[in-house]
Image (cartoon, grey):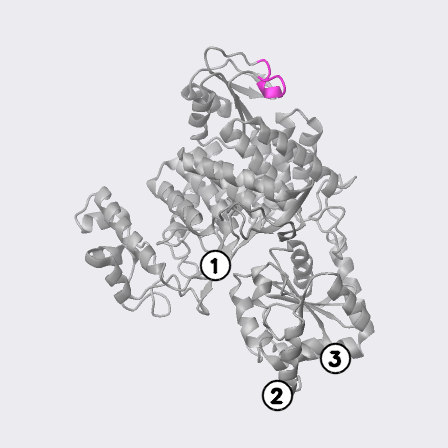
Amino acid sequence: MIPRQPLWLSFLFMDSMKEKNHLANETSPYLLQHVHNPVDWYPWGAEALDRAKTEDKPILVSIGYAACHWCHVMERESFEDEDVAAYMNEHFINIKIDREERPDLDHIYMDALTAMTGSGGWPLNVFLTPDRKPFYGGTYFPPSSAYNRPSWTDVLAGVANAYKNKREEILAQAENLTQHLVQSNSFGIDTAQPVDDWMDAVQVINQNLLKSADKERGGFGHAPKFPQTFSIAYLLRYYHFYGDNDSLQQALLSLDKMIKGGIYDQVGGGLARYSTDTEWLVPHFEKMLYDQALFLSVVADAWQITRKPLYKETIGQTMQFLSREMLSPGGGFYSALDADSEGVEGKFYVWDEAEFREVAGADADLATAWFGVTGEGNWEETNILTRPWQEEELARQFGLEREELQERIGTVRQALLEARSKRVRPGLDDKLILGWNALLNQACSKVYAATGDPLYLEMARKNMAWMLATFRKEGVWYHVAKEGDAGKGKEIPADSVKYPAFLDDLAYLVQALIYMQEVTGETIYLDEAVQLTKLIIESFGEEGNLMFYYTNRLQSDVVVRKREVYDGAQPSGNAVMVFNLNYLGIAIDKPDWRERADKMLASFGKAATRYPGSFGVWAGEILRANRGCEEIVVVGPAAAALRNEILANFIPHRILQSATHENQAYPLLRNKPSDPETLIYLCKDYSCQQPVNSVDLLLGQLKKASEE
């Protein structure tokens, strides 16, 4: 056990900490949460790494993020304890990392932990040799042994003792583990089979998704339940092409249960990170920007297919939440809202019956039924708001027409929102991340396409202009920024834009630019996407390997240069690059890009077929490859109106370009005469059918082509 320090030594230690605080100049909200810890935290960088070598001490890397509940718990229990901190400072070089600022480091050391223990999570606490090689780690450790976990103090003492007395074993373990990380990262060699080998994969993927589906409560697998929007998107596309009603019903059941459950904020809109139970009742209350983006995209798909009012209402509520709580003055979107307020998880979002009824006023009976509020509550003697009733049943019970029911519930929801706004709010992580903004930009384009609401297009335009101006400095792309006073007539300071952009950042941005070109008809976005793709190939690619590295070729502070391929909480940058290379390869006639995309896809065909829950975006690209990609071109003076009419329909796996006149600079826009009539061309491999002058006729052509 760690020996307890005399009280006078703790006071001296605290005084010395006031003189040297290595996190004080950081901009990450997560790192700043730890500024006042007695632990002598360093940010990742040369100062800490050099000190570890000079003093021959092991490095403790502790990785978390601002909205992480268990990160807060471990901080309160251990990192704020002066005796524990004194021991950490004596025996280790302690480094704090915001996983959202440095996802590259998080990937490396999370993979190491998974290799050691079979699982991972946050906070991630991993011990390294002075040359950054991992040898031991874990996630949350309690202050005293509990939950079948050793105490944090036992872990510290054990590691310190082993590093002192069993150095050779430690170094051997670190070397073996690092070599394992290198070897497990060797996929992508150009030995791929043609995509045609996987023509039956789409059916097997669908079967595997339905096997893992919860057919009663929606979603996939058991608790904890994550949204798994990639799987839902696949099922919707499979239904579209093959008419499989089981796929459609599972996709819609999953969306409906989430939208009506506790994982969805019934008052303010927006989706929590995941549900801790199978019923979608008790969420982990943090709200992440990327979850909103992926959720909106798939709800837009569902709206286009079904025209079910619930989906359009959900889009509107979630977009209002983003505008109200996540949108920065400059046009960027903040990263996350914390799960905790006043040190209690979920306190901001839950209600007791008395307070709820008081706010609901005359409609208290109707509102308690709509939101499932009871005296005993549904979670820790409080109520997480849900929607347990079918709308039609509730309208019938209260003798209301749907419009009146909606109006009265809308009034109550606004009153609840105003009352809730007076509570102590969860912390806002006001980092601005390029990749997450690009995902949200895509969502804005998709919900605009689905609903036609011009506010969403304006939001996408402003956000795209902001990204292009903020994250690119002197030709170099960056990952994260802090806006500060920007948006109020001031520019973002250069030193608040940090860390070279990662593959995900740039791959998502290319895709967002592609969608912006589709919804606006402006080829400037396509040109930007092409130039950015060339940069990705040069900076993240490697001769003889199909896959792209996560970090660019100039980044040197990682012990292993990884390639990320799994579709987890966010899409794999490599899977997104399959889409980008395929789309742009057609749009600008680059056969080598299309060939690379086909080979990348084929190399992961078997994995995606067997484990579509882990390779959901890859699975969607297999469906695209097997069904083909429709080329739709609109040319003429009324191109904008017809383009918007086309966009309102669910037409997956398409390339859409539009212009008021034919444009010889782009293959699909060449030799497309139209004036004075606006015409729509349906093409495949640049060979076009007879043009038509209405979207209905185009949809007929698409249906006929799908049946052939």
> Which range of residues does the magenta coloring cover?
663-671
Give the percent coordinates (x, y) of residue 319.
42, 45
Q: Residue furthest left?
A: 399
Q: Secondary structure at mark 3?
A: helix
Q: Residue 161 — which label?
A: 3
Q: CA distance from mark 1 to mark 2?
A: 38 Å
Residue found 61% across the figure and 67% down from its top: 139
The residue pinned by badge 1 equals: 286
Left or right: 295 with respect to 615?
Answer: left
Instruction: State if disc 2 and disc 1 touch (CB < 8 Å).
Output: no
User: Which label lies toward us, 1 or 2?
Assistant: 2
Residue found 56% across the figure and 43% down from its top: 438
The three-letter amino acid code for the residue at tag 3 is Asn
Nearer to me, 409 or 600: 409
The three-letter amino acid code for the residue at tag 2 is Leu
Instruction: State if disc 3 and disc 2 touch (CB < 8 Å).
Output: no
The residue pinned by badge 2 equals: 7
